[in-house]
Image: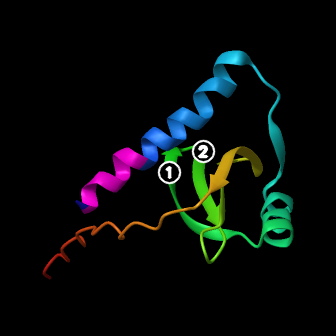
Amino acid sequence: MMHKAKPVLFAIALALTWPMAATGQSRNCAAFGLVEQRLAERFGETPVGGGVVSAREVLAIYATNDGATWTLVSISADGEACILGGGVDWLDLMPLDHPQPEKEKS
């Protein structure tokens, strides 16, 4: 059940970004620090999850403590952050268990 979170997050990210890319809509972007500050000040949102898309992009999800609102943000390697979408009623899933790499014996 826990391994279903990754496909669900991917599907959400794809659904939110596809219309924007397909229609060429203008992007809602600014410096990462400013975007993070505004999400905290205006909505009370802090980072709750995310992942690496490529060497040049990371996706982050910001949400309120009670999950009332959430925002999906793309952060590029050059420090630009773009709001891809958002919504209400964020649902926290159980964290994925990642096996720890075994230490080499010396």
Question: Residue at left 76%, top 73%?
Answer: 44
Could you say which quadrant of the image residue 28 lies in?
Answer: top right
Q: Secondary structure at mark 1?
A: strand
Q: How many marks?
A: 2
Vertical position of residue 17 compared to residue 21: above or below: below
Q: Residues within 10 Å of mark 1 (few under 14, many from 20)?
A: few
Sequence-wise, the earlier of marks 1 and 2 is: 1
Q: What number is the disc on residue 57?
A: 2
Residue at the extreme top of the image, as rendered: 23
Which quadrant does the N terminus fall into? bottom left
Residue at the extreme left of the image, as rendered: 105
Question: Residue at left 67%, top 50%?
Answer: 86
> Would residue 69 be counted in the magenta stretch?
no
At label 1, the amino acid type is: Val
Image side of residue 13 versus residue 47, left or right: left
Residue bearing the label numbered 1: 52
Image side of residue 23 versus residue 56, left or right: right
* Residue 95 in picture, x, y percent from top left: 36, 70
* Residue 100 in picture, x, y percent from top left: 25, 73
Question: Residue at left 60%, top 45%?
Answer: 57
Vertical position of residue 104 compared to residue 22: above or below: below
At label 2, the amino acid type is: Glu
Which quadrant does the C terminus fall into? bottom left
Between 39 and 88, the residue placed more toward the observer is 88
Quick check: marks 1 and 2 in contact, CB under 8 Å?
yes
* Residue 93 in picture, x, y percent from top left: 40, 66
Whether residue 74 can be seen here: no
Q: Residues within 10 Å of mark 2 (few under 14, many from 20)?
A: some
Could you say which quadrant of the image residue 35 lies in?
Answer: bottom right
Q: Which residues are magenta?
A: 2-8
Question: Residue at left 23%, top 70%?
Answer: 101
